[in-house]
Amino acid sequence: MKSSYLCLVVSALFFLSCEKPCKDLSYNNPIVGQRADPWVQKVEDTYYMVATAPEYDRIEIRKADSINALGSAEAKVIWRKHETGIMGAHIWAPELHRIDGTWYIYFAAGDAENVWNIRMYALSNPSEDPTQGEWKEEGRIYSQGDSFSLDATTFEHNGTRYYIWAQSTPPKSGTSLFMAEMDGPTKLNEKEIIITTPEYEWERKGYNVNEGPAVIKRNGKIFVTYSASATDANYCIGLLWADEKADLMNPDSWSKSETPVFSTNPEVRRFGPGHSCFTVSEDGKSDVLIYHARVYEQIRGNSLYDFNRHTRARVFTWDEKGFPDFGQDLKD
């Protein structure tokens, strides 16, 4: 009788523990070395990862059954830069999205003859598994302005698909985040709005930058994280939010944190965290922040060519107001 009762108690405790996010869940950081701008997506029991390769010359996809296993997974190259013309240099920040049964990769690229002529492009693949099948070039994603543009992401809300990206604004104002509705997976509606521009001191260190948006919907709100300042130890993550019932194409619907929500912390050897995305833990019960950072502060030369930005993962929680708490003082 006592043995049966003990088994019942143990089973109940196990069930209750599984119903809550696992605060002790940890990952073998860095998950993948020398991979910046990571994007990790979970589909059923499989994780797919794309990121910026250190040579800035290709797009590769990793596939694994856990976040930790992404580091040892094959990096399958599915596309390489052009030798001449557009999409010929600086292949940056790919994101992988499944839309209406087709996979799309949104990425930024320069021209072979003008490497800083960065614009937004897309690939598509109808295969069930994005590591298989044929990837087709869909060409450029055109915004209303013809200027430096990159770091596109997309999300759906209440039957409408939106696109958020970073684009340069008038001279010396750096990059801002723009948003538009999509008229298809590779076409933007003519109406565009700006949802944030660098205005605070922490967004203007080295360069005036708002870039790398990522979206998560929780607690009645649409949250957008983004990265700010130069890509060295000044790089950090800011936060925007809007009510889920608001008109998302009204700039006044968006609020912005006056301080960064995740930034350099020398005590835990985290320098310049940024370009984040969101996924969920293997059991589906915990939210996970995927991001890149360095383990040292001093950089020789141009920070864009210091390739030691490593992909990291950490479980995060939500505070009493329903906002994300990324654990600024906690090590990975």
Image: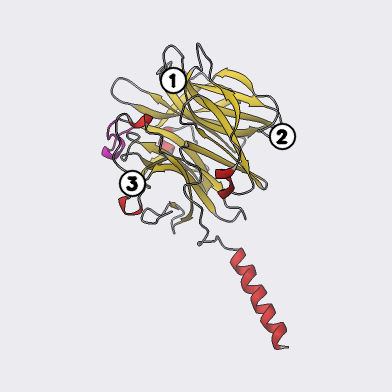
| Closer-to-camera residue (115/75) | 75
- Left or right, 329 with respect to 320, comes to left
Label 2: element kind: loop
Q: CA distance from mark 3 to mark 2?
A: 39 Å
| Closer-to-camera residue (11/223) | 11
Q: Which residue is mark 3?
A: 264
Q: Height in image: 41 above or below 84?
A: below
- What's the residue type where badge 3 is placed? Thr
Residue 325 drawn at (x, y percent): 43, 53
Q: Which residue is mark 1?
A: 118
Q: Which residues are magenta?
A: 196-207
First in residue order: circle 3 vs circle 2? 2
Residue 327 drawn at (x, y percent): 40, 55
- Left or right, 204 with respect to 118, comes to left
Image quarter of the N terminus: bottom right
- In the drawing, what numbered circle is on residue 197? none
Residue 87 drawn at (x, y percent): 51, 18
Give yes or no for residue 175 being in the magenta stretch.
no
| Closer-to-camera residue (207/270) | 270
First in residue order: circle 3 vs circle 1? 1
Residue 269 drawn at (x, y percent): 35, 50
> Can residue 246 be seen from the camera position used here?
no
Q: CA distance from mark 3 to mark 1?
A: 27 Å
First in residue order: circle 1 vs circle 2? 1
Q: Which residue is mark 2?
A: 128
> Can residue 307 be seen from the camera position used here?
yes
Label 3: element kind: loop
As drawn, which residue projects farthest toward the bottom?
1
